[in-house]
Amino acid sequence: QRLESTFLTGIEQNQQKLLRVCSVYAQDDDDMKDLFQEALIHIWQSMPSFEEKSSLSTWMFRITLNVCLRLQSKQLKKMERFLKMDSIRIAHIAEDPAYAASLDQFEQLLLTLIPRYEVADRAYLTIAFGCTGGRHRSVHVTEQIGARLRAAGYAPNLTHRNLTSPHQESL
């Protein structure tokens, strides 16, 4: 019962600080909540080993940070595996004769439309590229268009939803 009381008091006093740590490593609010929940689980499971050599706040912060860093490390390893496995597949995309012209057309379309959205006082514009697997062509095109928009002075927020999903063969 003492452990539970210490845990609940510690969470109550440090919740905002721990959420801030999670938010630094999260891609969105849902990720932040998941990280926070994972940190709470680790903190609770580690409560019996808390020896009060440091403050409870520092100890909880450290566990939360370790949870976030561990997840980040796993994500980077997945990304590295993806890049190693798929670099050969991605290399062929730029060899398509229509590739360069298509990218130029996308860029011109967006550079024409984006200022009109700004004049209409739109806060954001969602642009999506997709293909059957969602791991090669669409990822490559998204990165290329993102780089071109940055070069034009915009700050696109790129999200790749399916990079770590299992590869699905087309039907």
Image (cartoon, grey):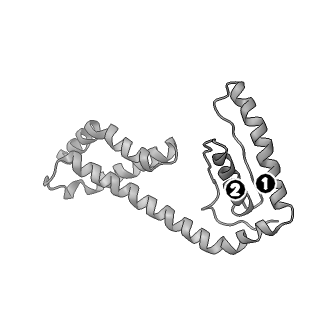
Q: Quadrant of the N terminus?
A: top left
Q: Which residue lies at the image location 81% right of the left edge and 59% below the top edge?
A: 100
What residue type is disc 2 on? Gln
Gap in angstroms between the C-alphas marked 1 and 2:
8 Å
Q: Position of residue 83 (x, y in %)?
A: 61, 69
Residue appearing at x 67%, y 28% in the figure: 122
Residue 23 placed where, x, y %? 43, 44
> Which residue is labeled 2 in the image?
144
Q: Residue furthest top?
A: 120
Q: In the displayed structure, does residue 116 sit left or right of residue 38?
A: right
Q: Which image quarter: residue 98? A: bottom right
Residue drawn at x 63%, y 41% as measured from the top left: 154
Q: Is residue 13 above or below residue 61?
A: above
Residue type indicated by callout 1: Leu
Quarter of the image where one finds residue 140: bottom right
Q: Secondary structure at mark 1?
A: helix
Nearest to the observer: residue 24 or residue 107: 107
Q: Who is closer to the viewer here, 146 or 52?
A: 146
Give neighbour class at mark 1: few <14, some 14-19, many 20+ (Cα, 10 Å).
some
Callout 2 crowding tier (Cα within 10 Å): few <14, some 14–19, many ≥20: some
Q: Residue furthest front?
A: 152
Q: Which mark is residue 47?
A: none
Rendered location of residue 79, percent (x, y): 56, 65
Q: Quadrant location of residue 13?
A: top left
For the residue pair 64 and 119, the one nearer the viewer reads as 119
The answer to whether residue 34 is left or right of residue 142 is left
Dividing the image into 4 quarters, which one contains the C terminus?
bottom right
User: Is 133 in front, or is 37?
Assistant: 133
Q: What residue is shown with label 1?
A: 103
Q: Earlier in the sequence, mark 1 or mark 2?
A: 1
Marks 2 and 1: in contact by CB < 8 Å?
Answer: yes
Q: Secondary structure at mark 2?
A: helix
